[in-house]
Image (spheres, grey):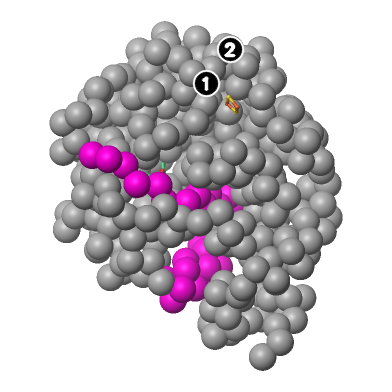
Amino acid sequence: MELDISRIKEFNDDELKQLIEYDESINQDLIKAADVVRRKYYDDKVFLRGLIEFTNYCRNDCYYCGIRCSNRNATRYRLSKEEILDACEQGYELGYRTFVLQGGEDVTFTDEKICDIVSAIRSKYEDCAITLSIGEKSKESYKSYFDAGANRYLLRHETADASHYGKLHPESMSLDNRKRCLYNLKEIGYQVGSGFMVGSPYQTTDSLVADIRFLQDLEPDMIGIGPFISHKDTPFRDKDNGSVELILRMISILRLMFPYVLLPSTTALGTISPTGRELGLQAGANVVMPNLTPVKYRTQYELYDGKICTGEEAAECRGCLEKRIESAGYRVVTDRGDVAKN
Ligand code: 5AD
Ligand code: FES
């Protein structure tokens, strides 16, 4: 069966499956079509998000993740409020107008502390977006961060196939709860980002179709996807990494299905291929997330082996990314980069 990509939004599950499993030959056509759509909605703009990995303590034990609580080899750290504010200041000087505070589910960062940090950033940087990425919380907690000044929240669903979810996470976690969190975040008024790993152990094409169907229901503003990369101190240490080809194909499919969406070309993609992030942009991604974490902690936020950008100061990372974005044929913009949906 020949697939007409222009009908992608009406594809049934079998057609989507066929597209996801397609051989190399279709990839270039798909990528070109995605770039046309990306330019229609976002021109050649690439948005920057300054990423502050502020704690690698985590109460969860996800089988894929290097900072899972049972990894005794991880050296744990937490940034103080002052260190977080310093990182924001550096980021602001480098032109970033979005700060992403990401961390494990660290119980010592109580709602009160998170709200205190968020409101301190909010009062200093009125023109910036504050994004949180700190996992599953109650609706009340999410509301309190929002009221303190947070605007966006990233929480990948990881996989929308419940049995697959169960193979990636311990029993204490559930896809239902993850989904509930995402719908709560939307209801509160956050710009919401979800997403999934590509090539995670036990993933099938059916589960990737389920991911797309779930995202169609959620209608997120942002979709973060990256390849699974094994980490030596996890139960998945011997599992294969996700492939560059499949992730690029998924980026293009997502761009075509969700033309307006903010789609990062991720550090994980840059880790499995030296030009991964450039290729991701050319496949339809329009966001990159330079690292603002103080260099002395960088290697400790090790979700997977071989993570790049761990040695460079914030300014070097900024320069490096700008060159990469331009070499891929795009342009860095330094505004907040809100979604083109509304
Ligand atoms: N490989 C790739 N991505 C990972 N993440 C966590 N562990 C890994 C890994 N081993 C991703 C998850 C999480 C995000 C912060 O990092 O998708 O949501
Ligand atoms: Fe961070 Fe290249 S993007 S060093």
Residue 86 visible in the current orientation = yes
Q: Give left or right: position of 328 versus 285.
A: right
Residue 148 visible in the current orientation = no
Q: Give left or right: position of 213 versus 169.
A: right
For the point 42% across and 26% down, the residue is: 53
Label 1 C-beta lies within 8 Å of the nearest ligand 2 atom: no
Image location of residue 21, percent across then percent down: 55, 74
For the point 28% across and 35% down, the residue is: 67
Q: Which residue is mark 1?
A: 292
For the residue marked with disc 1, what is the amino acid?
Leu
* Quadrant of the snapshot with the N terminus: bottom right
Q: Is residue 66 magenta?
A: no
Picture layout, residue 143 above or below residue 96: below
CA separation in Å, label 1 and label 2: 8 Å
Going from the N terminus, do you reach mark 1 or mark 2 first? 2
Q: Which residue is mark 2?
A: 90
Bounds of the magenta segment: 205-233
Q: Is residue 217 magenta?
A: yes
For the residue marked with disc 2, what is the amino acid?
Gln
Callout 2: helix, strand or loop?
Answer: helix
Picture layout, residue 229 above or below residue 167: above
Residue density around tag 2, few if under 14, some if 14–19, many if 20 or more, within 10 Å: some
Q: Give left or right: position of 72 versus 14.
A: left
For the point 51% across and 44% down, the residue is: 272
Between 62 and 80, the residue placed more toward the observer is 62
Image location of residue 104, percent across then percent down: 31, 35
Picture layout, residue 90 above or below residue 141: above
Split into quadrants, the picture shows ligand 2 in the one at top right
Q: Mark 1 and 2 residues: CB-CB less than 8 Å, in contact?
A: yes
Residue density around tag 1, few if under 14, some if 14–19, many if 20 or more, within 10 Å: many
